[in-house]
Amino acid sequence: MLELDGLTRRFGEVVALADLTFSVAPGRMCGFVGPNGAGKTTAMRIVLGVLQPDAGRVRWNGAPVDAPTRARFGYMPEERGLYPKMRVRAQLVYFARLHGLAASDAAAAAERWIERLGLSERAGDRVEALSLGNQQRVQLGVALVHDPEVLVLDEPFSGLDPVGVDVMSGVLRERADAGVPVVFSSHQLELVERLCEDVAIVNRGRLVASGAVGELRERGRGAWSRSGSASRTTGTAAGWPACPAPSWRRPARAGCSCAWSRARGRTPCSTRPAPPAP
Amino acid sequence: MSGRSAVGLVARREISERITEKSFLISTVISLVVIACVALLPNALGFGGKDGYTVAVDDPAMQSVADAAVRQADAFDAKVELVESGDADATLTSSGIRAQEKPDDKLLNILQAANGQVRSADALRDAGLDDRRASAALSPPPLRLTTAEPIDAAAEERGGFAFFAVLLLYGQLIGMGYFVAMGVVEEKSSRVVELLLSTLRPRHLLAGKILGLGLLGLGQLLLLAVLGLAVAGAGGALDVNGDVIVAAGLALVWFVVGYAFYAAAFACAASLVSRQEDLQSVLTPLTLVLMVGFFISFGVASDPNGTLAQVVSFIPPVAPMTMPPRIALGEASALEVAGALAVTLGAAALLVPLAARIYSGAVLRTGGTIKLREAWRAARA
C-alpha cells in the first residue's frame, strides 16, 4: 500500500498541498485528477523525493519511504526528460543502474524493454534523433526498466497518439495486474474511467474525493456521466471535457469542468479560479 | 543506492558520453597538434637557436670586412655566411651596405663592427704598428661578467615552459568549467534532471559530474603535458630534467585544486539558468576572474619573486595560474607552494558546499535566471 499522509507544501504564499491524504493499493490503478495547479505534480514529486514536504509523509507498506525504497519506484515526470544526446540503450542501462541494478541485470532489463516497446531498431540511436512517439516510449522504458514496485506517472497519456495510448495503457494494466500500485495523473476523465479502479480528486492542494471509480460515480451520478459523455463526444486529447484548454487556469464555462465540483458537492470552480501553478 | 555508487555512476556516464563525442576527440587532437607545433616550431623557424644571415660582396675591397663579419658573428650569437649572388640579406658595396629591405639590426651591428675593426686595423697599420700589436689593440680580452645571483643558462627555455604551463592551465580550467556548466544546463533544459533527482541527491549528481569531467580534464592535460615535454625534449627546445618534470607534475596538482574551485563555481552559476543561451551571462564573472589570473601570470613570470608574485600566488582564484609559473621558474620555495596549495584547497572546501546548496536549490527551477539568494533559500537539507 502506497500512502500519502497529510502532505503539505507551500511555495512562498502559494499553498500547493494542504494535508493531502490518500492511498493506492497494490494491483490497483489509481487516477489522480484535478485542475491545473491543483497540486498533482507537487504531490508526485514529493512521493519521489524530488521535493520535500513541509509536513506529512509518504509510506510504502507501512514504512516511511526513504532513498533505498524510492530506488524501487518508477517515475515519469510531467516534464518529459531524457539525455538528448545519449543513445537509447545506454540511457535505459544508465537509469537501471541508478535504480540500483547490477551492470549485467541492467543490460538485460534494457534489452527486454527495448524489445517490449518496439525500439529494437532504434536502440543505438541518440534520443534526439527519435520521433516524439518513440521518445515517449523510451521515457516509459526508463520508468519501468528496473521493474518498479510502485509506479507514479505524471500525465503519462498527454501528447500520445492513439497507438501510444494503447501501448501505455496496456503496459500500465500489465504492471497493475502484476501487483504494482499504479498512480497516474490525467486530465482525461474518459481514460481514468476506462482504466482505473480508483480515483483521487484534488483541487487547490486538497483532496476532494477518493475511492473506487464505480462508487464515486454512484455518488455523483449526473455530474459524472455528463462529464464522461462530453469527453467522448469532443474527444479532446488533453484538458477537461468540452472546456477550452487549459480550462482551469481561467474561470471555466458553466456545465463543463464544474462537473467535478458538483460531484464533490462544493462551490463550482467557475467562480473560483484555481491558483497559478507554482 | 549509496551516495558513493551514485557519484561513481554519474562520473562514469560523464566520461563515457564525453569521450565518444566527436567534438571532444577533435578538440583533443587539435590541442595535441598545437602543442607539438609550439614545442617544435621555434627551432624549425630558427627562434631560440642562432640567427643566420647571408652576406654578398660586390666590391673586392670589402672582402676583408665580410671576412671579419663572419669571424665576429659568434660574439653576436649569430652566424654569417658568404654567398655569391645578390640574393643575400645584405650586400657590401664600395659605398656601403645595400639590401632589398632593411636588414635585421643584429646583422647591421655585425657589419658595422666588422667594418670598424677592418678600418681601425688599416689605420693602425698605416700609423706604423705591426700586425701583432695592431690585432692585440683591436682584440682586447673580453670583459668578464660577474653577477650576484648565479646565471641560469636555461632561463629562457624555463620561461617558455612556464608560459605554456600557464596557457594550458588557463585553457583547461576554462574549458572544463564550460563543460561542467553546459552539462548542468543540458540536464536542466532537457528536464532529465527531475528523473535523475528521483533516484539520487542533487549533491551526488553534482559531485559525480564534477568528478567525471575532472578526471577527463586531468587525463587530457596529462596527455598534453607528456606529449609536449617529449616533443620539446626531443626537439631540443627544452632540457627535460628532474626539475622540469616536478614542475609539470605540480602544475597538474594545481589543475586539480583549481578545477575543484572553478568547477563548483561554474556548476553553481549554471544551475541558475535553464537555457544554453543564458549561460554566457552567468559565467562571465567567472571567466573574467580566470582571465585576470591569466594576465597577472605574465607579470608573475617576469618577476617571479616580486611582491605581486608572492601575493597573488596565495589568492585562491588566481593561485592556480600564478603559482605554477613561479614553480616552473624555480622561484617558489617548497613551503610557499605547500602554503598556497593549502589556502586554495581550503577555499575550495568552503566553496563546494555553498555551491552544492545553491545548485540543489536552483536545479529543479526552470524559467528565467534565478537569483542566488532565492536558490539559497529554496535549498533544503
Image (tube, rainbow, N blue to C red):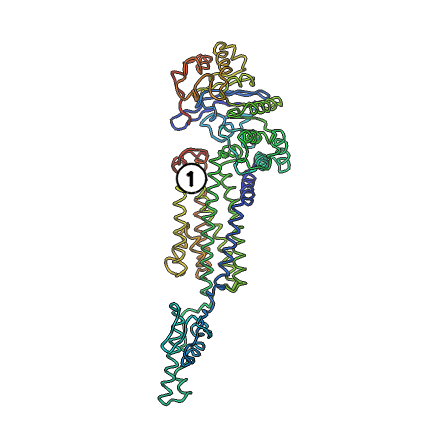
Across and down, in percent, residue B215 comes to 53, 47
Residue occupying the point 39% across, 48% down: B288
Q: Quadrant of the N terminus of chain B?
A: top right
Residue occupying the point 52% across, 12% down: A217
Q: Residues within 10 Å of mark 1 (few under 14, many from 20)?
A: few
The chain letter under disc 1 is B
Q: Is residue B97 visible?
A: yes
Q: Is residue A108 above or below residue A251?
A: below
Quarter of image, res B301: bottom left
Label 1 SS: helix
Across and down, in percent, residue A140 comes to 56, 29
B160 or B128, which is in the foreground? B128
Across and down, in percent, residue B182 comes to 47, 41
Q: Is residue A58 visible?
A: no
Across and down, in percent, residue B8 comes to 56, 41
Which residue is tagged 1?
B277
